[in-house]
Image (cartoon, rainbow, N blue to C red):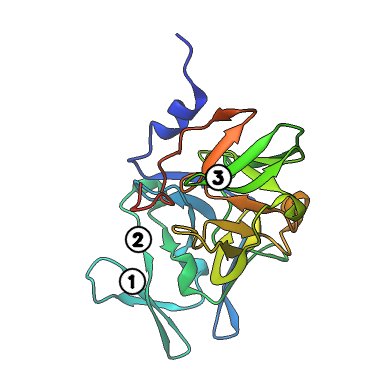
Amino acid sequence: MSTRVRDSLMGAFGELRHEPSEKRVRAQAGGRDVVDTTSAVLVWKPGHMVPRYAVPVEELRAELAPADDGESLDVLVDGTRLEAAAFRPSDPDLGDHVILEHGAFERWYEEEEPIIGHPRDPFHRIDIRRSSRHIRVELEGALLAESREPTLLFETHLPIRFYLPRRDLVLEPSPSSTRTVCAYKGEASHLSFELPGGEDIAWTYESPLVDAAQIEGLVAFYDEQVDILLDGERRERPRTQWSRGGS
């Protein structure tokens, strides 16, 4: 019996997983490199989709101390304490490594390129394709956008996102103060519409990362919060972390 690849990849979701990396990885705090290694390992904690980097303890240019939570470790850098910034995995294959929390450090680099948001998953990808399919976006019966020139973004484990030219918006959105970061696309600015339920339902990448250059300036909507009609067929709203009230 053939196994769907997605099911195979998710089969170990509840387990600690790791994948060696051949990239030079650096983490900075206090204006200096706390880690500079070519022996980093990507680690997925049980139940987590996003990986972190684990590095050899002997290559950590800082001290470790027990954290207040009794489980994590604080990282001491030149008198500065990075709280709960690390932990030791209870796995013999990673016994000489320490896993670092990405957000506890000021900057991360792979080779000379900054890491945005979190380390990229080598088994996660985006594919961007121009299309001529007919897209309508509605909210409680109000038409927000209609296009026959969408750009479709396919991303592992996520719904298709339909990026539309700004000229195809029927209603003009207002910029929001909400910003989000994607490791694969960059920083997104959110948009709101003056309708009930219209707050932060769309976003745009004004300066996307090079791998996502095709969606620069285009507008996408949360399918979880609006109605998408694709070639006349209404799509079922997906249930994800962006659904109203959560997944």
The residue singled out by tag 2 in the image is 88
Q: Amino acid at mark 3?
A: Glu
Helix, strand or loop at mark 3:
strand
Task: Label 1, secondary structure: give it.
Answer: strand
Asked if residue 212 shows in the view, the reply is yes
> What residue is pinned by disc 3?
138
Along the line of sight, which residue is nearer the eye, 115 or 238? 238
Does residue 211 appear anywhere in the picture? no
Q: Of the residues under marks 1 and 2, which one precedes in the sequence?
A: 1
Q: Quadrant of the N terminus?
A: top left
Secondary structure under tag 2 reads loop
Residue with the mark numbered 1 = 73
Which residue occupies the foreground of this view, 244 or 138? 138
Q: Mark 1 or mark 3, which is nearer the start of the sequence?
A: 1
Residue most extreme to the left: 70
* Mark nearer the N terminus (3 vs 2): 2
Contact (Cβ within 8 Å) of mark 1 with mark 2: yes
**Image check: 132 left or right of 60?**
right
Q: Amino acid at mark 2?
A: Arg
Q: In 3D space, how far apart are the residues under numbered discs 3 and 2 (Cα atoms)?
A: 48 Å
- Name the residue: 49% across, 63% down: 199
Name the spot of residue 30 as percent of width and height, x first. 54, 86
Query: Which mark is in front, 3 or 1?
Result: 3
